[in-house]
Each structure stands twice: as C-alpha cells, then as structure tokens.
C-alpha cells in the first residue's frame, strides 16, 4: 500500500514544474542582480571580468526588462564585455 502511494506521489511530483527561488527570474531562472551588490559577489565579478580569476561567479539574469539597473554586472558574470557607454 505504501509503495503504491509513493509511486503515485512521485509521478505527480514529476509533472510539476520546478519551484524557482523568489529572487529568480521567471523567464530564465537565474538570480536577479540585487543592488547594492554584496561585497563578495562584486569582488568575484570584477576579478573574473578583468581576467585575474578563473573562478566564474554565479550567473545572473540578463533580461533587460527585470534587471536593467544591474545589466552590466550580469553581463560580466557571463564572461561578456561591458556594454558601450556603461558606467
């Protein structure tokens, strides 16, 4: 009886979409840039962006409609160059 119920619950859970963190983008699933950027993340992004570290910082959301303020920072986490005209 228990194994049959466990099988049903497992099949039901498999059909459900994964839950996203409340700070994650609904479109891409990556975390949003939160300003001000925590010191550890900022340091990791700058080091990776300058090429002085091979440790990639966590990928951040690049969707312009939900993180326009931190878009330049998010580009650096993907290994992309900063945008022209960005401060």
Image (spheres, rainbow, N blue to C red):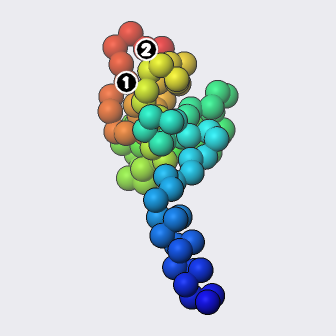
Residue 19's label in the rendered image is: none
Q: Is residue 5 visible?
A: yes
Residue for point 43% across, 38% down: 28
Residue for point 56% across, 40% down: 24
The Cα atoms of the two marked residues, 2 and 1, are separated by: 7 Å
**Horizontal arrangement in the rendering, residue 49 relative to residue 34 (left or right):** left
Secondary element under disc 2, as helix, strand or loop, is loop
Near mark 2 (Cα within 10 A), the count class, few <14, some 14-19 or many ≥20, is few
Q: Which residue is mark 1?
A: 82
Q: Residue furthest front?
A: 1
Q: Which residue is mark 2?
A: 86
Residue 20 lies, in percent from the top left, at: 56, 47
**Horizontal arrangement in the rendering, residue 54 relative to residue 6 (left or right):** left
Secondary element under disc 1, as helix, strand or loop, is loop
Q: Quadrant of the N terminus?
A: bottom right
Q: Is residue 42 above or below residue 86?
A: below
Residue for point 44% across, 34% down: 27
Residue 71 lies, in percent from the top left, at: 46, 24
Contact, mark 2 vs mark 1 (Cβ under 8 Å): yes
């Amino acid at each position: 009886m228990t194994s049959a119920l466990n099988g049903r619950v497992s099949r039901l859970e498999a059909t459900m979409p994964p839950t996203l963190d409340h700070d994650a983008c609904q479109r891409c699933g990556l975390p949003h840039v939160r300003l001000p950027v925590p010191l550890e993340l900022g340091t990791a992004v700058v080091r990776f962006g300058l090429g002085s570290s091979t440790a990639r910082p966590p990928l951040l959301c690049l969707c312009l409609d939900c993180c326009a303020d931190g878009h330049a920072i998010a580009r650096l986490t993907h290994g992309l160059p900063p945008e022209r005209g960005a401060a």
